[in-house]
Amino acid sequence: MAWWFEIKLWKRVFLGLALGVAFGFAVSQTMAPEAAAALLDRVKIVGDVFIAMIRLVIIPLIFMTLVAGVLALGDPAKLGTIGLKTIFLYLATTFFANIIGLSMGVLFRPGANVDLGDAEPRLVTAEAAGFWDRIVAMATKNPFEQFFAGNPMTLALTAVLVAIAIIVAVRSTRAGEKKPASGVLFVSLFALGVAAASGDILVVIFSSIVFGVVVLFLGATGAPVSRFFSYASDKVLGVTQWIMELAPFGVFALIAWVAGTKGLETFTAVFWLAVAVYLGCFLHMGLIYGGIVKFGLRLPFINFFRGILDAQMVAYSTSSSSATLPVTISNVSKNLGVSKSVAGSVLPLGATINMDGTALYLGIVALFTAQAFGYQLEPYHFALIAVTAALVSIGAAGIPSASLFLLATVLEVFDVTPEHTALVVGFIFPFDRLLDMMRTVVNVTGDAAVATTVAKWEGEIDEEVFRSKAAQ
C-alpha cells in the first residue's frame, strides 16, 4: 500500500471524484430506482463519516492554530496591521466577485425563458439566519449540545479522534520531542474541543485572538504558553493529516451519491445557470486571485494554483470551506511557504468571512430570478444587489448550500414576493450541490490568495518554497 500514499493527495481525491461519478451514474442506470437509492444511501455513509470527522476537529484546529499564529507574531501591533490588511483584501476581492457575478448574469441571462411551473416551492427556514442573527445566537448556543445528545456516531468518532491525537502525541515524544506534559495537555484540550463541535466558529475565532493577544502582552512571562501552542498547532495538524487520508474514499462516496441521485438531466435543466456560475468562478480565480499573485506579488501564479490543488479538490468534493480548512492550512504552509503566524491567523478568519464564491453566486441567482419572473431592474438595483450579496456572504456558514438560504435577503432588494422566492429556492435546491461545490473552491482559493498576499507584504513568506516545483 506504500504506492498509494506516494501519490499526491489531490490526485487521489481526483481519482475518487472520477470513480464516484462513474459509479453513481452506473448504479442509477443499471438498477431499479429504489434499489439504486438504497445502495447509494449506504455508500454515502462513508462520506458522511468523513465530513463528521472533519467537523469534529474544526474547533480544536482553529483554536490551536489561531492562538499559535497570534503568538508567533511576537508583537501585538503586528497583529493589528495583519488584521487590517486581511480584512481589506477580503472585502476588495468580494467587490470584484460581485462585479463578475452580475456580469455573468447579464451576459448569459440564465433565467430567460425558464419555466418554474414544475418547481415545488421551498420556504426559506431558520437556516437563513444572517450575520446579526448568528451574533445574537452566540450568547445562548450550547457548544456541547451535539456531544451531550449522545449520538452514537458522534461519540464513536470522538473516541477515534482522541485516540489519533494520543498516537500523534506519543509518536512525537518517541521521535525525540520530549514534551510529555505538553502531550497530555494537548490531548486534553483536543478532546475538549472535539466535544464542543457544535460551538460557533465566530466565537472560537474571537476567543482565540483575545487569548493570544493577552498572552502576547505578558511578554517573557507568557513564553511557556507560546511554546506549548507552537507544539499543539503542529500536533493538531498532524491529526488532520490522518483524517485527510480518508478524503479519496469520502469524496468517492459523496460524489457517487450526488451523481446517482441527481443525475445528468438535473444538470442540463439549468445548463446556462451552471455555465454562468462555473465560468464566473473560474474568471474570478484566474483574473483576480491569479492577477494578485502574478502582478501584485510578482510570484508565479502556476505555482500558486499547483500548491493548493489538494485544498481545491477537497473543497469541491465537500462543499465546505470549514471542512477544507485543515488541508488549506497545510497547503499554504508547506507548498506556498507562508509562515505559521500568517497562515494560522488569516486562514481561519477567511473560512468564516471570506465568501467570494457566495457573493458571486447570489448576484447571478438574483438576476436569474428577475429574468425568470420578469422583474424590471434599474441601474441602482445592481448596486444594491452587489452590496447586499457582499454583506450577507460575510455571515454565510461554511457548510453546504448555506448561501442558498441567504437568497431571500438579496431578493428583497427588488421586492421579490415570498412566493417567487420559494419557487426559486425550490427550483435550485435539488442541484445546488453541483453549484455549491464550485463556489466553495473559490472561497478556499481566496483564503489562500489573501494569506499569501499578507505574508508577502509582511515578509513572512519563504519564496524559495513557493517557487520550488518539488514542494508542490
Image: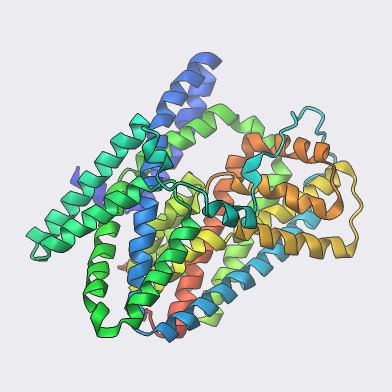
Q: Is residue 7 visible?
A: no
Residue lying at 22% horizontally and 53% vertically, measured from the top left:
187
User: In the rendered image, which quarter is residue 157 located in?
Assistant: top left
- Its colouring scheme is rainbow
Classify 30 as above or below 95: above
Q: Nearer the viewer, residue 155 or 46?
A: 155
Outermost residue, front side: 140
Q: Quadrant of the C terminus?
A: bottom left
Residue lying at 30% horizontally and 51% vertically, measured from the top left:
192
User: In the rendered image, which quarter is residue 430 located in?
Assistant: top right
Q: Position of residue 208 (x, y in %)?
A: 40, 66
Q: How many marks?
A: 0
- Left or right placement of residue 71 versus residue 392 in this view: left
Q: Position of residue 102 (x, y in %)?
A: 76, 59
Classify 459 as above or below 151: below
User: In the rendered image, which quarter is residue 283 located in?
Assistant: bottom right
Q: Position of residue 1 (x, y in %)?
A: 20, 42
Residue lying at 26% horizontally and 74% vertically, measured from the top left:
226
Classify 443 as above or below 82: above
Q: Is residue 399 visible?
A: yes
Residue lying at 67% horizontally and 53% vertically, measured from the top left:
361
Q: Nearer the viewer, residue 396 or 459?
A: 396
